[in-house]
Amino acid sequence: MVNVKDIVQYIIEQLVDDPTSVQVTAEGDDVKVLVKKSDMGKVIGKQGRIAKAIRTVVRAVGMRENKKFNVEIDELEGGNEA
């Protein structure tokens, strides 16, 4: 069985400047990603293309488990340093 949290964590860590600051939590069908404000653009991408691609990968994983996962991307509290 595949762990959606680990997949999302791996993808996001490859995109950001500071992988140690990435926080991914999974509760039920909800996956919440927290990154620094300075990394938000890298995670979301132009016109949301990277975020959409991440959600597509998660959807494909969910299909194997007959689940629908919801991925929410937000910035860390106090993550205003550039």
Image (cartoon, grey):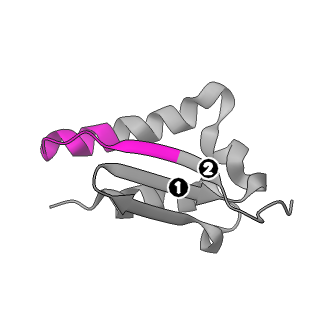
Q: To which quarter of the image does residue 19 belong? A: bottom right
The image quadrant where one finds the N terminus is bottom left
Q: Residue at left 83%, top 60%?
A: 80
- The residue under the point 60% across, 54% down is 15
Residue located farthest toward the right when viewing the structure as drawn: 82
Q: Residue at the location (27% across, 62% down)? A: 3
Residue 56 numbered mark, or none:
none
**Residue 57 position (above or below residue 80):** above
Contact, mark 2 vs mark 1 (Cβ under 8 Å) = yes
51 with respect to 28 (left or right): right
Residue 9 location in percent, x, y? 46, 62
Quadrant housing the C terminus: bottom right
Q: Residue furthest top?
A: 47
Is 43 placed left or right of 67 in the picture?
Answer: right
Front residue (pair 2, 32) = 32
Secondary structure beneath disc 1?
A: strand
Within the image, what quadrant is residue 47 found in?
top right
Q: Mark 1 is on which residue type?
A: Val
Q: Which mark is residue 74?
A: 2
Q: Could you tell me residue 16's position as x and y percent? A: 65, 58
The span shown in magenta is 58-72
Q: Which mark is residue 33?
A: 1
| Number of marks in the rendered image | 2
Residue 56, percent from left and from top: 37, 35
Q: CA distance from mark 2 to mark 1?
A: 6 Å
**Mark 1 Cα within 10 Å, few/some/many (few <14, many 20+)?**
many
Query: Along the polypeptide, which appears first: circle 2 or circle 1?
Result: 1
Task: Please tell me whether residue 8 belongs to the stretch shown in magenta.
Answer: no
Q: Which quarter of the picture shows residue 76?
A: bottom right
**Circle 2 Cα neighbour tier, 10 Å, few/some/many (<14 / 14–19 / ≥20):** some
Residue 54, placed above or below residue 37: above
